[in-house]
Image (tube, rainbow, N blue to C red):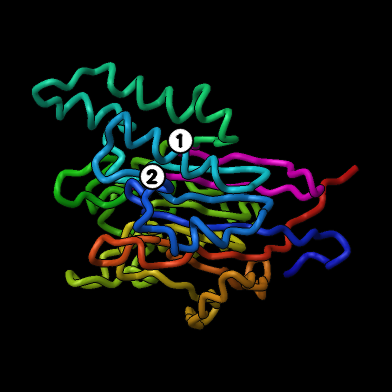
Amino acid sequence: MSAPISSTISTRVLILSDTHNFDIDDSNLNQHTIRNALPAVDVLLHCGDLTHCGGTSSFKKAIKLLGSIDAKLKLVIAGNHDLELDRDYWTAHLDEGDVIEDHDAALEIMKGRLAKEANVVYLEEGTYSFVLENGAKFTIYASPYTPAFCDWAFAYEHKQDRFSQPQDTLDGCVSIAQHPIPDAGEVDVIMTHGPPKDILDECAQGNVGCPNLLRAVTRAKPLLHCFGHIHEGSGAVRMHWDSCAKVDLANTFPEPLKQDTVWGETSLVVNAAINDDANTPANSPWLVDLLLRKVNH
């Protein structure tokens, strides 16, 4: 059931993902929308893969990109390519010249002075609540983890469920959830790095999204679920959960996509990968006007 219009505030959200070392100082990218046509927004969501394969200079470049965007709140997660940000992965994959402290250095870039100056809030896996300057409030679930593939960071095995408690897990899977996705009515936005199964997840290897994530998102029914990871899947759909029907949506950027979702019934689902399947920044970000609940005074 939707909230009354009088109790909601239209909130402009910019969504992007998989920028992979996008360099705002590269003259060859002068015509890309990230450099030339980004409007001021209330919230920026970056769904991970800030870099090609980590590296201190690459994380700094990502912060510079995010700092160039005019947003009141900038929420960012890691992706499987952002290697040093996954401490367990980095510790187990030290190569010649690598040191454990590289993880701390990367985290300092994403959470320290440079991030604060750029107004960036780096989210690790979990659920967070925010109140915006426009008087809106929202709860967001964030997770950088994706099914294991080619030994990248933030991975879990295909039969492991990071997103649900044991009673909600698919048959044959084992819950390893430390921060499960909340139930319906308890979360407005879900931001993951990877897609759920069969939604904007098609690539040369087939539909490679996560079935456990799909089950959890179906249970949560957020207003918005955004991700990236599968470059070929860039796009958006409106999910009707009762019928599992998907309605394809065109990217109207730089005009905002108006919310036409109903709490508990439909969700806007966006694969916001900027890079295409050739790993070039060919796609525009997504601009969305969400109706978020007002703060109760």
Residue placed at 24% from the left, 18% from the top? 100
Q: Are marks 1 and 2 in contact (CB under 8 Å)?
A: yes
Residue placed at 33% from the left, 57% from the top? 229
Residue placed at 57% from the left, 76% from the top? 252
Residue type at the position of mark 1: Glu
Residue placed at 34% from the left, 67% from the top? 197
Badge 1, how many Cα within 10 Å: few under 14, some, many 20+? Answer: some
Identify the mark at residue 144; answer none if there is no mark. Answer: 2
Residue type at the position of mark 2: Pro
Q: Which of the 4 quarters of the picture holds residue 93? A: top left
Question: Dividing the image into 4 quarters, which one contains the C terminus?
Answer: top right
Q: Specify start and end residues of the magenta stretch as a single range.
A: 123-145
Q: Nearer the viewer, residue 217 or 146?
A: 146
Looking at the image, the residue that sits furthest to the front is 27
Q: Position of residue 21 (x, y in %)?
A: 33, 46
Looking at the image, the residue that sits furthest to the right is 297
Question: Dividing the image into 4 quarters, which one contains the N terminus?
Answer: bottom right
- Residue under numbered circle 1: 124
Q: Is residue 147 left or right of residue 118?
A: left
